[in-house]
Image: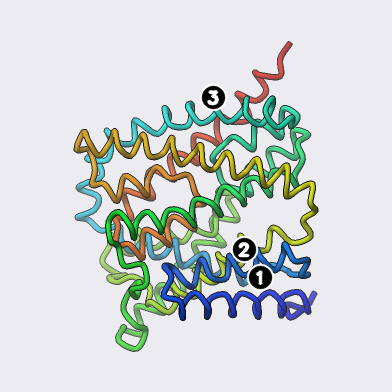
Amino acid sequence: MTFVTKGRVTTFAIAALGALLFTLMGLPLPLLLGPLAACLVAALAGAKMQDAGGLGTFMRTFLGVAVGSSITPATVQHLPDFATSLLFVPVFIALIGAIGYPLFRYGFGFNHPTAWYAAMPGGLQDMLIFGEEAGGDPRALSLIHATRVLVIVTVAPLIMVAYWGVDLTQAPGKPASSMDPVQIALMVFACFSGWKLAERVGLFGASILGPMIMTAALSLTGIITTRPPAEIIWAAQFFIGIAVGVKYTGITWRELRVDVGAGVVYAMILALISLGFFELIHLTGVAPALDAFLAFLPGGQAEMVVIAIIAGADLAYVVSHHLLRIIIVILLAPIVSRLFQRP
């Protein structure tokens, strides 16, 4: 199957137009939110689009490299400082499930597996697989989770700009022209080899976690000493924006009213819960306000990494919380779901 298709050409043209418009308008995260918004509007208008396939997945791997390169010996020394904050994550998940499941099951009328896996703040692909295997509606799950990510990654930058005055239009790193070519080659090796090794062993989130682990090992040994260049992070943003927006392709009015509507309501509830935990952690002095805010927003892993990089947040702190959240959900969600189904 050829990579260049009519659907992909349409997608890239629409995404590029969205990125250009957001850039010209001076909006935050133009290379992430621009393609996302443009693809969303085009999908709602009936455009036939197609995701970026393996190229899109490959571009996500550099986010894992960016996180891994931030894990240095000095960072490791501070990991115990995260322990108190990480203890809030299981409570956070339990509260989300306790509110989300009844909302989807009884408020919107989804069947048990669809309601359960729609409420779980795990990785999109993992929740789709678990939900479909349990008898859930994969299309509804895809739209609900895509909407959760869409709302959170749209609202979060606006709050960050308005409340903290964060400049989200700044370059996310050094230009490639100023970097050592050997370092760039090492990062490309780490992203590709880490990704494929993680896939081979069946690691969830292989495209991000594999490169992250590989790069962290090279960073801790002093082999990799810098983050990916700005151009790579910009490109990764572009492809992530496409990935979220394209999920709405072929949407019907019923799906828009029921599935997307449910996703919007749930995302707003999640945002309020997240703000409560953020305020608690900030007031107790466990972590800086911006870091806590990004750590407890249940957006997509890739999307939150991008925002954390641009904002200059503590990547190790933010990613450790999202990673723990996803691990807990993946390990326990299927078990708890089966318990709920017992007579």
In this figure, which residue is indicated by the disc labeled 2?
Answer: 243
Precedes in sequence: disc 3 or disc 2: 3
Residue 8 in the image, given as x and y percentages of width and height: 72, 75
Q: Secondary structure at mark 1?
A: loop
Q: Is disc 2 surrounded by few (<14), some (14 to 19) or many (20+) residues within 10 Å?
A: many
The residue sitting at 39% across, 42% down in the picture is 296
Give the vertical position of 77 relative to 47 (above or below). Answer: above
Precedes in sequence: disc 1 or disc 2: 1
Q: Which disc, if any, is residue 52?
A: 1
Out of 112 and 274, give the one closest to the viewer.
Answer: 274
Mark 1–mark 3 Cα distance, whole angstroms, equals: 36 Å
Mark 1–mark 2 Cα distance, whole angstroms, equals: 7 Å
Q: Quadrant of residue 35?
A: bottom right
Q: Secondary structure at mark 3?
A: helix
Looking at the picture, which amino acid does disc 1 mark? Ala
Residue 317 left/right relative to 121? left
Give the vertical position of 323 relative to 57 (above or below). Answer: above
Q: Quadrant of residue 190?
A: bottom left
Residue 133 in the image, given as x and y percentages of width and height: 75, 37
Out of 262 and 91, give the one closest to the viewer.
Answer: 262
Out of 208 and 140, give the one closest to the viewer.
Answer: 140
Give the vertical position of 90 relative to 40 (above or below). Answer: above
Quarter occupied by the C terminus: top right
The residue sitting at 33% across, 57% down in the picture is 162
Looking at the picture, which amino acid does disc 2 mark? Ala
Quarter occupied by the N terminus: bottom right
For the residues bearing labels 1 and 3, Cβ distance under 8 angstroms: no
In this figure, which residue is indicated by the disc labeled 3?
Answer: 98
The answer, for residue 144, to whether it is visible in the render is yes
For the residues bearing labels 1 and 2, Cβ distance under 8 angstroms: yes
Q: Secondary structure at mark 2?
A: helix
